[in-house]
Structures are given as structure tokens and as C-alpha cells.
Image: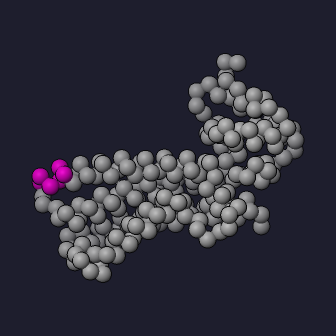
Amino acid sequence: MTDIEKAERMGRARALIMALAAAVLIFNVWLQYGDPQYASAGGRGASWLVLIGLWLFILWNGGGLRPGGRVRALLNDELSLQNRSRALALGFYAAILLTLACYVGAWLTPIAAGDALKIVSAGAISAALLRYAWLEWRLH
Amino acid sequence: MPEGLANRLREHRAGRELTQAALAEMVGVSRKTINTVENGVFVPSTTLALKLARALGCSVEALFSLEQD
């Protein structure tokens, strides 16, 4: 298998994994919403930091940590970098909109700070992951 | 495609009997990048445009032009 074929295969897998990760993040927010245990100091609270930190890191460097230099370069070529920039821009807008939604939502019903921060962080990361996954997937 | 930019990458590639994958290999990008440039979905950087021109043995102007030209 050539490096080009390897990169294509890994690119498809990356897009799929990112879409699945977005779904898992959203499911986690839904599952943990209103439960203070998941936002308190301790293992459960820290697991959220690890989860968000991990996907933020992957979004930042495009994943593909394992493969060698050439395949990695092909995975993160010009087009992929542009797609990532577009995905990160959408994530930023999603964060702002979700912050506003939480702000307005709190007028109607109290929202714990931990829950609001989870909604904003998961929503922003998920939006970026889904956008990146879609932009990459549709080109294969 | 951004307004006013035309490209003749497909014609030049086909003229040299190269597949998208082969051209991608020559310039060090993925096949989907070549595909999107050919379809006008993606506008390559100057660096990539120069690499494409060199790989195909022609000038950048032969590959890319403004539509009104």
C-alpha cells in the first residue's frame, strides 16, 4: 500500500472517529446534566477535563500522531489544514452562541456553572469535530 | 470555486497520462487535494501551485488563470 493510500484510509478513519467522538461528548453532557458529582473535584470531575483536553489537542494537531512523517504530512496537507481552520472557526462561533444560550437559559431555570461550562465546551468541541469530519469525509 | 479563477489542471494531468494519485505522490499532497483543485473546490497556495506546475512541466499561468483573461 502506498503512502497516499495509507493516508486516505487513515483520513477516512479519522473523520469517522471524530464524528463518533462528537456524539459521545454530547451524550456525556446529556447523561451528566444536573448531577453535581460529575462536576465536583475528584475523579469524575477530572475525567471531563481529560476528555475535553484530549479532543482539543487532537483538533489542534489533526490527530495522526502515530504514522511516520510522510503519511502524517499527507494526512495534514493543505486541504486538511484549511478544513481544520474552518472547523475551528465554527467551534468558536458555537462556543459563543452556547454561552449566550446558557446566559438566557439561566433567566428561565437555574443552571449550575459546571453544567453550563460542559454545555459550552462539549458543544464547541463537538461542532468543530463534526464540521471537520464532514469536510474531510465528503471529499473521499 | 472563488469567483473568476479557472484551472486546467485536469487537462494537463490527463495530457501526461497521470492519475490523480500519481500527481499527488509527485507533489506530496493527498489525492483528494488534487481532486478538489481540479473541481475548483479548493484554491491551492502559491507553493502548491508552483509544485503542480513543476510536476506537470508547465507554467503556473498555464494551469491557473483569471476567468476574464
Residue at 12% across / 60% down in the picture?
A110
Q: Is residue A34 visible?
A: yes
Above or below, B12 against B65 in this view is below
Q: Quadrant of residue B49?
A: top right
Q: Position of residue A59 (x, y in %)?
A: 48, 59
Residue at 28% across / 75% down in the picture?
A45
Q: Position of residue B45 (x, y in %)?
A: 64, 39
Q: Quadrant of residue B41?
A: top right
- Quadrant of the image for the N terminus of chain A? bottom right
- Apparent side of residue A68 relative to residue A112 in the rendered image (left or right): right
Q: Position of residue A130 (x, y in %)?
A: 46, 56
Residue at 19% across / 51% down in the picture?
A103
Q: Is residue B39 visible?
A: no
Q: Is B47 contained in the magenta span? A: no
- Apparent side of residue A13 relative to residue B20 in the rendered image (left or right): left
- Quadrant of the image for the C terminus of chain A? bottom right
Please name the predominant secondary structure of the magenta segment in the image. helix
Q: Position of residue A70 (x, y in %)?
A: 70, 61
* Highlighted magenta segment, given as a residue range: A103-108
**In the image, farthest residue toward the bottom:** A43
